[in-house]
Image: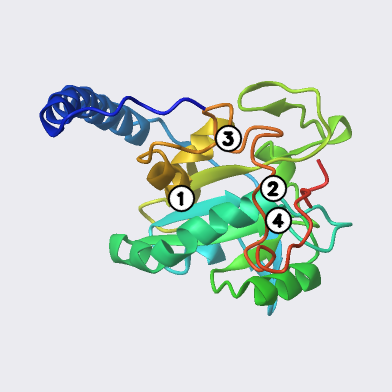
């Protein structure tokens, strides 16, 4: 790729000020988008979702852990595989360190995958992750939130449009407790490039001259992020192929 021009410090300052104006405009537009996202209407869930956890069955309500809000990451882990998707695993590496702070804002976090809980626990120990992670293997949760596509289950849309695919896909959903603490409301779900904001590693690279060193700007576009590996596989040169079954 071509590198930028090399200029004097004075010329660089002028160019930086021009870019700063663009960054400020983007920040203001992002603030407006954030407010619009926060004001999305809510949908009351009429289905009782039950998951398998390391100590037995848990409900969606249990995942709130007594808090008002819950963020769920739909982590791709196909039931027949031994490991989760390396791209989803990379996302979890990126956000795992910040999750401890969510409780200060009355918010819980959990990952949900379709793999059996025994496989989830084995992989969680390998990755040294501590966040709650449960199995939806015996639940409709993945199908209802369109992160496992299967026409026989009525799940054929991804990112709010028909998607010709069968299998596991990534996403993130947010939920709110009713004021009486009894019901659960669905507030937000995002997929595909909507997950880019979860990846501070990319946003750090975006501030360098070489950037993401991928052809497309979208996060982890198909074929663009083959360099990503499970975090314990870089030094030992493990396989770079995706373990997500897609």
* Quadrant in the rendering for residue 37: top left
Label 2 environment density (alpha carbons within 10 Å; few <14, some 14–19, many ≥20): many
Q: CA–CA distance between discs 2 and 1?
A: 29 Å
Residue 201's tag is 1
Mark 3 secondary-structure assignment: loop
Asked if the residue under mark 3 is in contact with the one under mark 2, i.e. CB atoms within 8 Å, the reply is: no
Q: CA–CA distance between discs 2 and 4?
A: 9 Å
Name the foreground residue: 67 vs 178: 67
Q: Is residue 192 left or right of residue 8?
A: right
Q: Which mark lies nearer to you, 2 or 3?
A: 3
Label 3 environment density (alpha carbons within 10 Å; few <14, some 14–19, many ≥20): some
Q: CA–CA distance between discs 4 and 1?
A: 23 Å
Q: Earlier in the sequence, mark 1 or mark 3?
A: 3
Q: Which mark lies nearer to you, 4 or 1?
A: 1
Label 4 environment density (alpha carbons within 10 Å; few <14, some 14–19, many ≥20): many
Q: Earlier in the sequence, mark 4 or mark 3?
A: 4
Residue 113's tag is 4
| Residue located farthest toward the bottom when viewing the structure as drawn | 55
Q: CA–CA distance between discs 2 and 3?
A: 16 Å
Point 57% across, 68% down: residue: 132
Q: Is residue 93 left or right of residue 162?
A: left
Residue 141's tag is 2
Name the foreground residue: 217 vs 85: 217
Residue 62 picture location, percent across and down: 55, 66
Does residue 217 appear anywhere in the picture? yes
Mark 4 secondary-structure assignment: strand
Mark 2 secondary-structure assignment: helix
Q: Earlier in the sequence, mark 2 or mark 3?
A: 2
Point 79% across, 59% down: residue: 115
């Amino acid at each position: 790729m071509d590198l930028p021009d090399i200029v004097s410090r004075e010329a660089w300052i002028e160019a930086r000020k021009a870019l700063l104006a663009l960054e400020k405009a983007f920040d203001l537009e992002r603030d407006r988008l954030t407010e619009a996202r926060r004001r999305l209407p809510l949908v009351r869930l009429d289905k009782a979702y039950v998951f398998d956890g390391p100590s037995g069955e848990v409900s969606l309500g249990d995942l709130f852990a007594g808090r008002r809000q819950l963020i769920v990451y739909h982590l791709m882990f196909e039931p027949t595989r031994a490991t989760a998707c390396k791209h989803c695993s990379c996302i979890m590496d990126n956000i795992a360190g910040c999750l401890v702070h969510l409780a200060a804002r009355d918010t819980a976090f959990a990952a949900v995958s379709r793999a059996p809980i025994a496989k989830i626990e084995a992989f969680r120990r390998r990755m040294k992750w501590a966040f709650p992670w449960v199995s939806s293997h015996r639940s409709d949760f993945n199908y209802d939130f369109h992160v496992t596509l299967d026409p026989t289950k009525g799940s054929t849309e991804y990112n709010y449009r028909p998607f010709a695919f069968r299998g596991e896909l990534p996403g993130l959903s947010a939920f709110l407790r009713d004021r009486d603490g009894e019901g659960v409301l669905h507030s937000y779900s995002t997929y595909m490039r909507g997950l880019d904001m979860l990846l501070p590693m990319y946003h750090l690279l975006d501030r360098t001259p070489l950037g993401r060193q991928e052809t497309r700007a979208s996060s982890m576009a198909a074929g663009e992020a083959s360099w990503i590996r499970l975090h314990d596989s870089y030094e030992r040169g493990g396989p770079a192929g995706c373990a997500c079954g897609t």
